């Protein structure tokens, strides 16, 4: 199976924010920020007789609501523009035993048995090489038939990876 993909900065930014904020710790932080925001609003409206928020509540709200997203954005921006693999159009060939990736400035082959895990999101296929590094395939750049075929290829590859890990005891 052959694919041609390209990920724009906007697409990559949306994906990274989604992946970041789906983690439980970030959801808890957003919940805390929402509670602090409600506390401040209810105090200003003189509802429920809440105590006056002190500077620490404002600082915490600012850190969670402004600084944290700014840090995520700057990290994503730096990673996207420093990576040849993300910015360039990639031609991928998925074979029975490996994935071959041709970029404008590089060539890479990865055996399926070396893949950490696979994930399908609403708009993406993710092929993780390890916990932090993934091959990103946007569904937007695929036809319906290609999406179906890719699901089959990834399911077979995942099955082979599972068999291999059992054999070597990983």
Image (tube, helix red, strand yellow):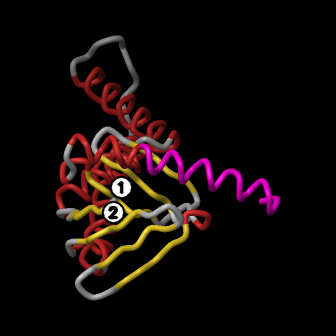
Residue 71's tag is 2
> Are circles 2 and 1 on residues that touch, CB within 8 Å?
yes
Residue 156 part of the magenta segment:
yes
Q: Position of residue 40 (x, y in %)?
A: 30, 30
The C terminus sits in image quarter: bottom right
Position of 12 with respect to 8 (left or right) is right
The correct choice, above or below, for 76 with respect to 104 in the image is above
Tell me the residue at 35%/26% (across/down): 39
Q: Is residue 16 magenta?
A: no
Classify mark 1: residues with Cα within 10 Å, few (<14), some (14-19) or many (20+): some
> Residue at 24% across / 77% down in the picture?
81
Q: Position of residue 103 (x, y in %)?
A: 27, 79
Q: Which residue is mark 1?
A: 68
Find residue 12 and report its horizontal and vertical position in percent: 26, 59
Position above or below: 71 against 44: below
Q: Residue at x 29, y 63 (%)?
A: 2
């Amino acid at each position: 199976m052959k694919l041609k993909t390209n990920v724009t900065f906007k697409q990559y930014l949306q994906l990274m924010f989604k992946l970041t904020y789906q983690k439980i710790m970030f959801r808890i932080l957003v919940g805390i920020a929402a509670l602090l925001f409600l506390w401040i609003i209810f105090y200003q409206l003189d509802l429920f007789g809440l105590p006056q928020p002190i500077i620490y509540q404002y600082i915490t709200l600012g850190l969670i609501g402004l600084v944290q997203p700014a840090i995520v954005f700057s990290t994503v921006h730096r990673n996207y523009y420093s990576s040849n693999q993300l910015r360039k159009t990639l031609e991928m060939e998925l074979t029975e035993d490996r994935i071959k990736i041709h970029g404008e400035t590089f060539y890479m082959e990865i055996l399926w048995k070396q893949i950490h895990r696979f994930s399908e999101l609403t708009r993406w296929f993710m092929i993780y090489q390890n916990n932090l590094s993934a091959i990103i395939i946007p569904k937007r750049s695929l036809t319906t038939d290609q999406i179906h075929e890719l699901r089959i290829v990834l399911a077979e590859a995942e099955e082979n990876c599972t068999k291999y890990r059992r054999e070597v005891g990983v």
